[in-house]
Image: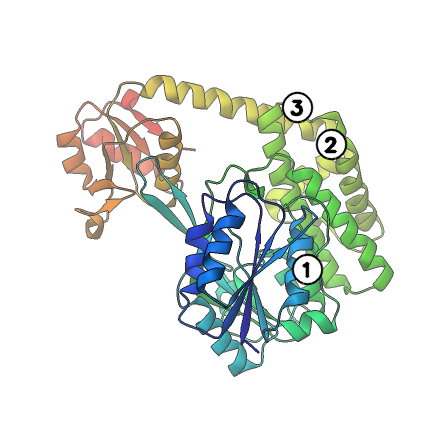
């Protein structure tokens, strides 16, 4: 019996599958099996998998007649022989020591679930990748790392980290508690129920701050880039609540945190739909009504309180429940403003040299945005001397003084949301005209 089973659900990912499967077979931990569950690929994916299976006896290929991510993963879980199970999505890849390190910790602490941090990545048109670390916890919650915890003792865990692929699960824990994915069609958001139900049962889990998983963000067909996410989200939470009321598997504190997570995720998906359509399609209103009704009922019966939600969510929550027209109008106006700002940006930057001031997370956003518009960046300027002379995303980093000397006629984009006013003034003091300074917001 292998120590760990890697489940790889696939459907038409021939562009990405080789990097993914190479990262699996190249693991430092050799005592694994790799179960590839394909749902009828027609683009050469299955042929690539077969090529690797001929070379490596640890690889098994299973064919699914149902195009459902949940169904595919469930097939993998049921066919698995490993003590532990990990899910590797086939447009991503992993560090070569991921499973060795996860299993070592799981054995040491007798864990049923382990989760790590991960890195998102985008590939620019020049082929250079940009990575962004995504942490499970920040601020005071960092103390939750490297501890054996449970959602019963720490119900806030339901608010964080729905992702199922950045860690591993004890197979017996899943089987004994009948924890499987919903087998809804498609490949979006089936991890919601799986995550919350796993949290309801787990007594021994751990989060670690190391990052091993590389999550692709530039696949236009991925669920994170899908404008139907709101419908999928509502569908999965409706299934979850049906199970919750039948089995009463969550305590009040866990339920509260699940609802907070649901509303935050809803607002994010809602904004994507509005951004794309500039109005909510009629067939989405039933899903919106269901989410509004469930939150309203839970507030009115005092299961949860408005104060349980984050400060930035409280006003939008009130409008969402009691004044939906105002809620929708505010999102439409924000979307219109963003689109107008983008058009203005593009028009102003056309034909100009560009320097991004700040090469942190915000600077990466600007670089990727401009790359998507085929606008080249000349340099990064940054106040951190340790970064000077290096490159970020293939772009040179230099001091603000050197950037001003080299790119005197450039447009400077201030990319730091906390210190933008000071940085803008710094550029003015270096004799950059205010009309040539844009602040990324």
Decide: is 440 above or below 167: above
Q: Residue 44: image x %, image y %?
A: 50, 43
Name the residue carrying label 1: 74
Q: Residue at x 56, y 26 (%)?
A: 335
Per the model, the C-alpha gap separating discs 2 and 3 is 10 Å
Q: Residue 25: image x %, image y %?
A: 44, 64
Colour scheme in the image? Answer: rainbow
Q: Which quadrant holds the C terminus? A: top left
Image position of 409 (left or right of 139): left
Q: Residue 322: image x %, image y %?
A: 78, 35
Name the residue carrying label 2: 284
Q: Residue at x 13, y 31 (%)?
A: 405
Secondary-structure class at tag 3? loop
Per the model, the C-alpha gap separating discs 1 and 2 is 29 Å
Image position of 202 (left or right of 140): right
State yes or no: discs 3 and 1 in contact (Cβ < 8 Å): no
Between residues 291 and 430, which one lies in front from this camera angle? 291
Q: Residue at x 67, y 73 (%)?
A: 173
State yes or no: discs 1 and 2 in contact (Cβ < 8 Å): no
Secondary-structure class at tag 1? helix
Number of on-image labels: 3
Q: Say whether disc 2 or disc 3 marks the residue closer to the N-terminus.
A: 3
Image position of 216 (left or right of 86): left
Secondary-structure class at tag 2? helix
State yes or no: discs 2 and 3 in contact (Cβ < 8 Å): no
Residue at the limit of the structure toward the front, as seen here: 54
Q: Residues within 10 Å of mark 2 (few under 14, many from 20)?
A: some
- Residue 279 image label: 3
């Amino acid at each position: 019996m292998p120590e760990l089973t890697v489940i790889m659900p696939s459907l038409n990912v021939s562009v990405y599958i080789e990097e993914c499967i190479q990262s699996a077979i190249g693991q430092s931990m050799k005592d694994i099996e790799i179960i590839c569950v394909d749902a009828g690929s027609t683009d050469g994916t299955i042929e690539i998998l077969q090529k690797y299976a001929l070379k490596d006896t640890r690889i098994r290929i299973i064919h699914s007649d149902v195009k459902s991510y949940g169904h595919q993963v469930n097939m993998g879980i049921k066919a698995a022989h490993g003590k532990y199970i990990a899910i590797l999505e086939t447009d991503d890849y992993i560090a070569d020591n991921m499973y060795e390190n996860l299993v070592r910790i799981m054995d040491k602490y007798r864990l049923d679930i382990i989760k790590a941090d991960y890195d998102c990545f985008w590939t620019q048109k020049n082929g250079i990748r940009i990575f962004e670390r995504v942490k499970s916890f920040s601020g005071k919650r960092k103390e939750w790392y490297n501890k054996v915890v449970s959602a019963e003792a720490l119900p806030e865990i339901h608010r964080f980290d729905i992702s199922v692929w950045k860690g591993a699960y004890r197979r017996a824990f899943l089987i004994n508690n009948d924890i499987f994915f919903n087998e809804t069609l498609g490949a979006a958001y089936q991890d919601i129920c799986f995550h919350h139900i796993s949290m309801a049962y787990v007594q021994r889990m751990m989060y670690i701050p190391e990052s091993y998983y590389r999550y692709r963000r530039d696949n236009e067909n991925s669920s994170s880039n899908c404008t139907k996410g709101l419908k999928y989200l509502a569908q999965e939470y409706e299934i979850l609540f049906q199970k919750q009321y039948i089995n009463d598997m969550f305590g009040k504190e866990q339920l509260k945190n699940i609802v907070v997570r649901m509303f935050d995720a809803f607002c994010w998906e809602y904004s994507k739909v509005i951004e794309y359509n500039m109005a909510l399609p009629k067939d989405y209103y039933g899903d919106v009504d269901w989410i509004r009704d469930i939150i309203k009922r839970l507030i009115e019966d005092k299961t949860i309180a408005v104060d349980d939600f984050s400060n930035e969510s409280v006003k939008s929550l009130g409008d969402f429940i009691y004044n939906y027209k105002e809620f929708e109008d505010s999102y439409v106006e924000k979307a219109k403003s963003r689109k107008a700002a983008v058009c203005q940006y593009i028009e102003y930057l056309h034909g100009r040299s560009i320097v991004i001031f700040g090469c942190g997370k915000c600077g990466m956003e600007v670089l990727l945005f401009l790359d998507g518009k085929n606008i080249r960046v000349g340099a990064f300027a940054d106040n951190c001397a340790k970064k000077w002379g290096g490159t970020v995303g293939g772009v040179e980093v230099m001091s603000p003084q050197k950037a001003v000397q080299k790119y005197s006629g450039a447009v400077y984009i201030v990319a730091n949301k906390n210190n933008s006013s000071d940085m803008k003034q710094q550029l003015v003091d270096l004799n950059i005209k205010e009309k040539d300074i844009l602040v990324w917001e």
